[in-house]
Structures are given as structure tokens and as C-alpha cells.
Amino acid sequence: MKRPHWPRRLPIDPYITLLLGTVGVAALLPARGTGADVASSASTAAIAFLFFLYGARLSTREALDGLKHWRLHVTVLACTFVLFPLLGLASRGLVPVFLSDPLYQGLLFCTLVPSTIQSSIAFTSIARGNVPAAICAGSFSSLAGIVVTPLLAAALLGGSVGGFSGDSAVKIVLQLLVPFLAGQFTRRWTGGFVARHRKVLGLVDRGSILLVVYTAFSEGMVQGVWSQVSPGRLGGLLVVEAVLLAVMLALTWYCARGLGFGREDRIAIQFAGSKKSLAAGLPMASVLFGAHASLAVLPLMLFHQMQLMVCAVIAKRRSKDPVPGVTAEDRAAPSRTEAGTATRSG
């Protein structure tokens, strides 16, 4: 029996370090008074700009071409917006032994957000999977999540942790959907600029999310939300999320095989269907939860790093699977050239 080969260095995402540093700054120097108003306004503008960029980046032609593989995309969407939420609801039975009620609400929200794009593509490529399918599946999930995630939050979270009201729905439309549609409609003129300046705009993306995190955790500190969290509760949350990730990785792999998908498609389904997007989830949580957003996004931040570390191991092992017509040298190539992209937030 072969021993599992672990990579020499697990991918600790540097961006997670920045996020944690931002949380630390918010804990020590939370925005108050006029500063809080300025940070809130800047955060609102940053969220709108983020979703404008999402719309400008998504190629309508690629999305339409991807519809040809509709069975795969329906499978990924079902994993993301059906299986994940069902497992989130089932975790209600762990309150109050493993989870406090606020942490459970954050975990449930984590199961409602769309899948990642960048890391799903990178891991699928490393594992020699269907990369075009992973691109389309991640894009479809992100697009659907703009509408589906708020609707699921309204149905499953109800009035808890900040609540979901008509005002929340208006905020979702104005801050997320309208900028996204504006990006799509103006893509003819802005798409080239966005593509040429992808790296710079990527830094703007991440800087905007850091601002959202600072604003959310500042509000949480001012409201005294963090008094509800203990080290024991955090440990319980990590255990629950590890089990959740393991279950989804197993379901996406074996269910895809049961549905008759080939190896390359199964890889794309596993990596796209088992992940949750930090970049999409943080802005949505800020809109939906208000002052309670700090606790709502904590499970998502932890799950994001966990999924990167575990999927890095799986992708490396899948890359060594025997594939007809692919030599050992070919299998090693993507591990050297693309592994670095897998730890980007998505």
C-alpha cells in the first residue's frame, strides 16, 4: 500500500495572512464615529466596483459556449447550492455542543456562497482535468450566486444575525447586481482594458476586500460581537469545517462517477463543486449581516484556507494518475508552472 505523498510546503495563502492582519488592525484600532461612516461608505463603493469588474471580466461568448456541457454545470451548481446548504442545515444539530448559534449562522452562510474560479481552475489544471469546464463552472456559479445566495440567505437565515429584509434586497440589487450588469453591458469598451491590466486590477480587488473586512470587523468590535467567541468554539468550528470539506470532496468525486462522467470531468466537478468563494462571500456578508458580518465571515475565511491546503494535496496526487498518452514529464509540468496560482483567492 502506497503512502500518501504530501507536498513539501502546504499552500498557506499570503492573502489569508493579510486578512488576519486586517482583523488584528480592526481589533486594535476599530473605526468609530466619523471614521466608521467614512469606512462604511468606502466599503460600499468598493463592493460595487468589485462586482462591476466581475461583470466586465465574464465573457458572454465563453459562457454561452460552456452551456454545451450543461450536465457538468448542473452537477456543480447542485453541489454548490443544494448539497452544501443541506449539510449546513444538518450542522444545526451541533449547536450548542460544538458551535455557538452565531458561528452556526456563519457556517450556514458559508455553505450558501458560490464556488471559486481561480483556484478551481488552477487545481483542475494541475490534476490534468477538464480546464475549460472548470472555467465555465466557476463563472456560472459566481453569476448564479449573485441572485441565488441572497435568496437562500433569506429563506434559510431569515431574521437571524442581522436579518434579511426588503431593505437588504434593495442593497443586494444596488450594490451587487446593478454593478455586475453594468460591467456586462460595458464589456465591449471595458473588457480589453480589464484584460490588459489584470494584475493591477487584481490588487484593487484584494485591497477592496481588505477594506470590507476591516469595516465589518470594526463594526463587530464596536458592537461587542467578539465576546461571543471562545477558543473552544473556534476549535469546534475547525473540526466541523474539516468534516464538511471531506464530505463534499467525497460526494463530488463519487457522485460524478455514478453519473457517468469521465476522469477529467470528475476532477473539474470535484474542485469546482467543493469550494466556496471568499471574494464573493465577503462583500455579500457585509451587505446581508451589517454589524454581525465579522462573525458571519469567520467560518468562510477558515474554510477558504482549509480548502486550499487540502485540494493542493489532492491535485498533486491526481496529477500522478496514469493517463493514456501523457508521459511522466508532461504530468510534472503543470505542478511546476501553475501551482503558484492555486493559492489565489477566488
Image: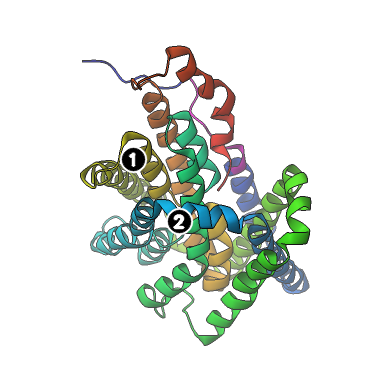
Residue 96 visible, this angle: no
Q: Position of residue 303 (x, y in %)?
A: 43, 48
* Mark 1 crowdedness (10 Å alpha carbons): few <14, some 14-19, many ≥20: many
Q: Quadrant of residue 342?
A: top right
Q: Give the number of the disc on residue 67.
A: 2
Q: Residue 138 versus residue 175: which sits nearer the camera? A: 138
Q: Which amino acid lies under the numbered mark 2 shown in the image of this protein?
A: Leu
Q: Position of residue 113 (x, y in %)?
A: 46, 60
Q: Give the number of the disc on residue 23.
A: none
The residue at 54%/28% (across/down) is 339
Q: Which residues fall within the magenta stretch?
A: 8-15
Relative vertical location of residue 319 with respect to residue 279 in this rendering, above or below: above
Distance from the alpha carbon under mark 2 to that under mark 1: 17 Å
The residue at 48%/13% (across/down) is 329
Q: Label the magenta part by its dominant secondary structure.
A: loop
* Mark 2 crowdedness (10 Å alpha carbons): few <14, some 14-19, many ≥20: some
- Secondary structure of the residue carrying numbered label 1: helix
Relative vertical location of residue 108 with respect to residue 239 in this rendering, above or below: below
Residue on which disc 1 sits: 266
